[in-house]
Amino acid sequence: MSGRQADNVGIVIVSHSAEVARGAAEMVRQMVGPEVRLAWCGGAPGGGLGTSVAAIGAAIDRAWSDAGVAVLFDLGGAGTNSEMAIEMLPDERRARVAICAAPVVEGAIIAAVEASGGAPLAAVRAAAEAWQG
């Protein structure tokens, strides 16, 4: 991990579809580059559509930065599972993870752009949530 990347808020993309999550992450990476730790997860553990609390927790770990982690998700169940994964984190990490109420693709791109410039977690979340299309 580059020194700069370690200083920036990480981004997690959660989707009911592994392909959607992977594609959104690929767009973020192509548009923002390697300046932001980025992780994604999607699909049910046995295949098909769904999300997994354990997979979301693992994605948060992969994207972890002391600056925090912004989590974006596609549908309600992914949000519920994201909240559960965050609740399972140690106290010192839980406070540094924010769910962004934003469209998963557009929000992730905007969040990553903000994060790549060194913005704090609150600003990354606000930028993603302010997107109007």
Image: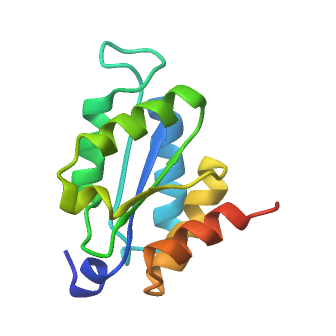
Residue for point 37% across, 15% down: 47
Residue 96 as seen in the image, left or right of residue 107 = left
Residue 58 sits in quarter: top left
Please provide percent x and percent y for residue 89. Answer: 22, 47
Please provide percent x and percent y for residue 131. Answer: 74, 64
Residue for point 25% across, 62% down: 64
Residue 97 sits in quarter: bottom left
Residue for point 22% across, 81% down: 2
Residue 128 as seen in the image, left or right of residue 38 = right
Return the residue nearer the eye: 103 or 101. Answer: 101
The residue lying furthest to the front in this view is 91
Vertical comparison of 65 with 48: above or below: below
Vertical comparison of 37 with 105: above or below: below
Residue 81 as seen in the image, left or right of residue 64 = right
Please provide percent x and percent y for residue 42. Answer: 42, 32
The residue lying furthest to the right in this view is 133
Is residue 15 in view from this perspective? yes
Residue for point 30% across, 79% down: 5
Vertical comparison of 116 with 128: above or below: below
